[in-house]
Image: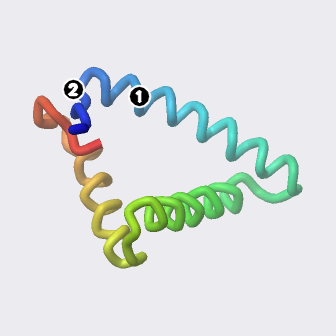
Amino acid sequence: MKEKKETKEQDAAIGQDFFQQLRRMTKRLAKRHGIELDRAADYLLAGSLFTAADIYDASIDETLEVMQELAVSVQVDELREETRH
């Protein structure tokens, strides 16, 4: 079954929702373990990298390339009608 690509509008809505969830998760992690918020964000980033590599069945380097592509896509104001994510 071919996956449907999200539109810019769907992508923005999903991204905003997920951003809010990740902020709450990071704050809970910091509070639960008594660590600084930026340290909890480090765990979030590292965990995301390892999770993506596992899902993609890819190396960390390959996954970093995907993450770089995604980072560039969110920095650009004029995204294509269909997005990668």
Residue for point 60% across, 33% down? 21
Can you identify the residue that label 1 sits on? 14
Q: Secondary structure at mark 2?
A: loop
Residue 32 x %, y %: 87, 49
The secondary element bearing badge 1 is classed as helix
Amino acid type of the residue tagged 1 in the rendering: Ile
To which residue does mark 2 refer?
Answer: 7
Drawn side of residue 47 relative to residue 85, left or right: right
> How far is mark 2 from mark 1, CA to CA?
10 Å
Residue 53 drawn above or below residue 20: below
Taking the spot 73% from the left edge, 43% from the top edge, the residue there is 27
Quarter holding residue 61: bottom left
Quadrant of the rendered image containing residue 25:
top right
Q: Is residue 15 left or right of residue 39?
A: left
Q: 85 or 43: nearer the eye?
A: 85
Mark 2: which amino acid?
A: Thr
Q: How many marks?
A: 2
Earlier-in-chain disc, 2 versus 1: 2
Question: The C terminus lies in which quarter of the figure?
Answer: top left
- Residue drawn at (36%, 69%) of the image: 64
Q: Quadrant of the N terminus?
A: top left
Comparing 17 with 35, the one in front is 17
Q: Residues within 10 Å of mark 1 (few under 14, many from 20)?
A: few
Of residues 60 and 57, which is closer to you in this image?
Answer: 57
Front residue of 5 and 10? 5
Furthest-front residue in view? 1
